[in-house]
Amino acid sequence: MDSLPIFIRAHADVQLFSWDRQIEAATRFGVTLAQVEEIALERGILPARYQRNRQAISVSDQLTMFRSSVCVVGCGGLGCYVIEELARLGVGTIVVIDPDVFEEHNLNRQLFSTPANLGTAKVNAAASRIGEINPAVTLIPVQAAFSLENGASLLDGCQIVVDALDSIKVRLELAAVCTSKSIPLVHGAIAGWFGHVATQFPGDPTLKTIYQAWESGNGVEQHLGNPSFTPALVASLEVAEVCKILLGQGTPLRGRQLIIDLFSMEIQAVTLHNNDEEQE
Amino acid sequence: MNITVKLFASFRTGRFDIETGDYPAGTTVADIADSLKLPQSELGIMMVNSRHVKLDRVLVDGEVLALFPLLGGG
């Protein structure tokens, strides 16, 4: 193992370490691709696959990203894009929770669905895809429905949770569990040409405020559907939030909700504040 | 009294983006939603003068009500 850092330094080209060499190092030293990646990043050497992450993300930021664990709850329209982007970004551990298998009506938008994998568990399809695009990332598939009962243990060890659910009831349960565990929650929801994004930091009533009028059932997505572009956009906004929070940079959507209307091409931020303030 | 109503997203379809109307004193958010045939089960964020409100909020002359549909898809 001592000679692995020497191997990495010897084969780094202008502080970049190629994928071929990463595989060679893992094989020669009997370690995982993830271990090679961490040792390189610790020495300021960037796996070459991340070179276009610079300058948005520095080498030390990349190490922070590698050591991060993000949980994505829901592996559908939003979740697939979120997972793809987190893996390409270089988030080291991604926990994916979803009980479902791919069905034909998922094919219009769910990135990991193909005619060949209909009937396959979504979380397993996600693991296969991430294994293809970035094998240095560890994806932990959990084929289960998130609930108040299992939620606290499912989120153990996660620094940030991404809401990619399709149920308002479960979103509110997820928000409650995140609050009890003091985990930031990046929320996104879509319907037709429309979507919104907000981040709930521990102690904030973000989702309760957004859904204060909700009593039961689903939103307008049940008759507006979900075309391909809306989840792609909202998922990307969610990943940008995750990236900033992991790195402690930029300005997240705290206490604000970004509302997207792709039909009128309008984006606006509204201030979220709790109900107590309203009674003043 | 005059109330300006701003509709967002799918609520605009077949209605309007923004419209100022004359409403009787004591009109609530729920009354306006009903008059626009917006099902209460589809109401998401409701704001008066940029502050979050509930359905029973009584409106005052000159206020601006914004209504967003409930979005829950993923």
Image (cartoon, rainbow, N blue to C red):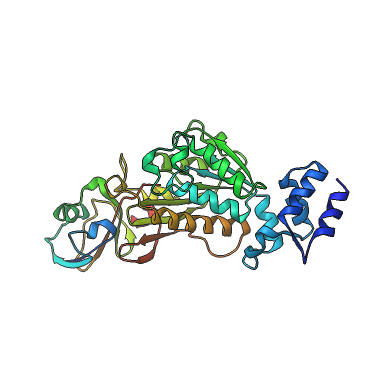
Residue at the spot x=52%, y=61% of the render? Answer: A252
Q: Horizontal placement of A93 versus A241: left or right?
A: right
Classify A55 as above or below A146.
below
Classify A100 as above or below B12.
above
**Total count of labels:** 0
Q: Horizontal placement of A144 versus B49: left or right?
A: right
Task: Give the quadrant of residue B17.
Answer: bottom left
From the top left corner, tell me how far across and down residue B33 is, in percent: 19, 54
Outermost front residue: A116
Residue at the spot x=62%, y=66% of the render? Answer: A56
Residue at the spot x=52%, y=52% of the render? Answer: A201
Tell me, yes or no, if residue A94 can be seen here.
yes
From the top left corner, tell me how far across and down residue A257 is, in percent: 41, 59
Q: Horizontal placement of A64 versus A172: left or right?
A: right
Which quadrant does the N terminus of chain A fall into?
top right
Tell me, yes or no, if residue A181 can be seen here.
no
From the top left corner, tell me how far across and down residue A19 is, in percent: 71, 54
Depth order, front residue of A195/A87: A87
Task: Give the quadrant of residue B35.
Answer: bottom left
